[in-house]
Amino acid sequence: MQGLGRSLRVSASTRISRSSIPCTSGGSAVTRHKRRKVSVLAQKTATTEPAAWTRPKQDPLAFPTEPSPSSKTQQRLRPDPFRLVSPELNVLRSNLLGLLGSAHPGLAEIAEYYFLHPSKQLRSLLVLLFARATNGLGRDWQLRHWEAGTEAHGGRAEELDRPLRSSETLSDCNPNMPDHTASFAKPFELRRPSAVKATSIPPFPHPPPLPTLITPPMLLPTQMRLAQIVEMIHVALLLHQNISDASKSPSSDSQNPFGNKLSILGGDFLLGRASTVLSHLGGGEVVELIASVISNLVEGEFLGMDKVQTPGLGVMEGPRTREEAWDLYLRKTYLKSASLMAKGARASVVLGGCGENEVWKEVAYAYGRSLGIAYQLIEDTLDYDACSPGLQPGLATAPVLYALEEHPELKHLIARNLTGTGDIEAAIQCVQQSSGVERTRLLAHAYAEKARETLQRLPDSDTKLALEGLTETVITRTW
């Protein structure tokens, strides 16, 4: 994938002069919900160019700017991705609201604030859609299906989903151990685990049938719980993100009405609960994927900070060249935005029985990665809408980096991460007087097209069409 970021940027630059895709300039007003700063991130995909702030060479090959009539017809026939899994999303939302509400009333209000907005369901939506699009294709699908049956008969699903508040919460040292072990006054005896009756376990099919897409689609309990984990991690990120935003601008109070302390505690609680449920999913690959997302989010937050200072290194400076700025921006975008989408989708396919050297999990990861970058590119253009809280100090985003090619004076502002007096106002003015927003939108279209191309490896289904339509939803959204 080396060089993908650069090639897509060059293609977007070529298309700008003749594109007919409707774009929103800096001064235009776009109707959308009050935006709560979210962001969620993209991978470093560009190769190293000469260390200069010069305009890249134009690529003579350009992406088509207008869809063909046949593609327009197909787009009208695509099912709504949110409606396709609306029953599952409703269950997910209800479980999350109940989970937080059972812990503390303040957490219940946080849950309603974040979980009842479509943008806050996108990550769990990907988990559910890829489960529908690939269940049955992996060589271990029958085993996973059989394990789900044994779990249901054993009552494990109900145990994982039970409310947190319990009368034994303060006295039970381990809910999974016998009651008499709760006291440490005397040694406890070891007991053999009670055997599950053979009649309660569905027989494992032997020999297993050949892999084929399950019709009608079905989801495994582990995949539903994964969607819940992904949503909790995302909302934890939002809560922690609002803490840093509140320290930068007084206007952030409207985006974070809960205050810093409740945001910190709420985010930590969600991460702890997500880790608990994750440990029960099984499968080392899934645990590693989701655990690595948390470290990705932290690293991405570091990259996006306006000023980093350590005793040994002092104040760390921003990027010094245009290409370094693009590399850092795309890397931060993957880490903070796209990694959760990409790894969450991949983990969902793995839970459905996809093993080593099977392409389905690679398709899910590549799609989520490209879609996540496209999502964040559009997110960064919304900073220049009339109803947006505006640009913030930190690593320069795509509209500013594109505007740099038309306004070289931005070089020094970018090098200090827009932290100087008047840097934000100057950057906004340069972006509004350039094609930065339009070119960023075209770059988002290019990444969305890459995501659609990835789906061609999947068998035809309504879910595949919904995933194709989701790429359009992401780049045309106003929320």
Image (cartoon, rainbow, N blue to C red):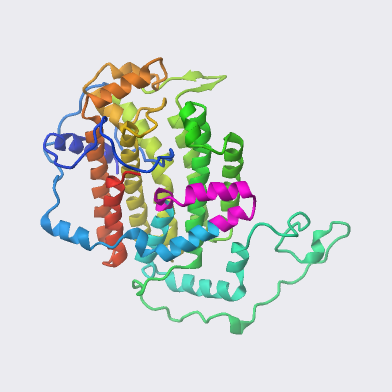
Q: Is residue 208 left or right of residue 182?
A: left
Quick one: 170 or 219, which is closer to the camera?
170
Residue at 50 percent of width and 36 percent of height:
242
**Placement of 475 over or under 9, stated as above or below:** below
Residue 438 rendering spot, x and y as whole percentages: 22, 35
Q: Majority secondary structure of the magenta segment?
A: helix
**Placement of 413 over or under 90, stated as above or below:** above
Q: Is residue 77 left or right of residue 367?
A: left
**Placement of 6 over or under 176, stated as above or below:** above
Residue 105 rendering spot, x and y as whole percentages: 62, 49
Q: Quadrant for the C terminus, please.
A: top left
Q: Is 248 contained in the magenta span?
A: no
Residue 202 rendering spot, x and y as whole percentages: 53, 81
Residue 191 rendering spot, x and y as whole percentages: 77, 70
Quick one: 169 or 33, which is closer to the camera?
33
Q: Residue furthest right?
A: 185
Q: Residue furthest bottom?
A: 199
The segment highlighted magenta reads: 97-122
Q: Is 101 contained in the magenta span?
A: yes
